[in-house]
Image (cartoon, grey):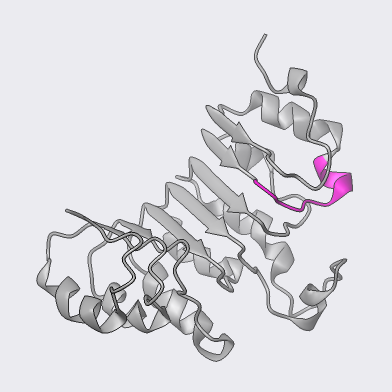
Amino acid sequence: HTLDLSECPAVTDAALAAALPTLPALRTLILRRCPKVTSSLAPTLARLRLTSLDLSGSPFHPPPSKGVSSLAQVLRLKLTHLALSDVLLPPALLRFLAPTLVSLALTRPAFCGCARCSLSRHASSPTCTFDDLPGVLAELTHLTSLTLTKCRLPAGVLSEQLLSRLAVLVLSDAQVPDEHASHPPLALSLSRAPLQRLSLAGWHIPPPPLDTLLPP
């Protein structure tokens, strides 16, 4: 049920396109740090019956013109676990996974590709999807593990509704607006969350006081 080809430099899209359809029982596919696995594999993945997919560290980077359609093919799978790196991921696409997703891990994602999002300080516009992330994450009602690494996040991303469900929260090297992340209610929300693991490593702002996060 599980195939792990992590760090296999010889694995290509063509080889996987030929082999994967012959594995009807495959449910977990791990292609972590495979330098020749690209977004061209998306149509093949879409035809599988996967529940867990890890493409972190692999150049699965759909070009902007095809990025949304390629990702949409993959996200229509009934995934419970998903890990991606360096992708343009409009938050609305995550709604495909709302009925099933338990674990989400994103490294260096971009949640909008508009010109305003390239600015050091984000300014919203009617076409920008950056600020849609908090609402979409709140809709992932089965999500219990969230990893957002090396990315910029909008204010309100750590809503009480989201935190109330998480057992694992990793925000390594995340950039959260100072006025949101350092606000006392965030520390209070984290202290009330059923977290078993919390990582704020490399935050670009001071983390909440530890005495507000640890149980007495």
Nearest the camera: 155 or 19? Answer: 19
Above-or-below relation of 93 to 107: below
How many numbered marks, from 0 up?
A: 0
Residue extending farthest to the bottom is 65
Q: Main secondary structure of the magenta part?
A: loop
Residue found 12% across the figure and 65% down from its top: 24
Is residue 209 rendered to the left or right of residue 60?
A: right
Task: Find residue 40 and report its image quarter.
Answer: bottom left
Q: Where is residue 52 in the image (x, y as percent from the top left)?
A: 32, 55
Which segment did they paint magenta?
172-181
Is the C terminus in the top left, top right, bottom left or bottom right quadrant?
Answer: top right
Residue extending farthest to the top is 216
Q: Where is residue 88 in the image (x, y as percent from the top left)?
A: 59, 74
Q: Where is residue 91 in the image (x, y as percent from the top left)?
A: 59, 66
Nearest the camera: 169 or 137? Answer: 169
Q: Is residue 188 visible?
A: yes
Above-or-below relation of 206 to 92: above
Is residue 24 rendered to the left or right of residue 13?
A: left
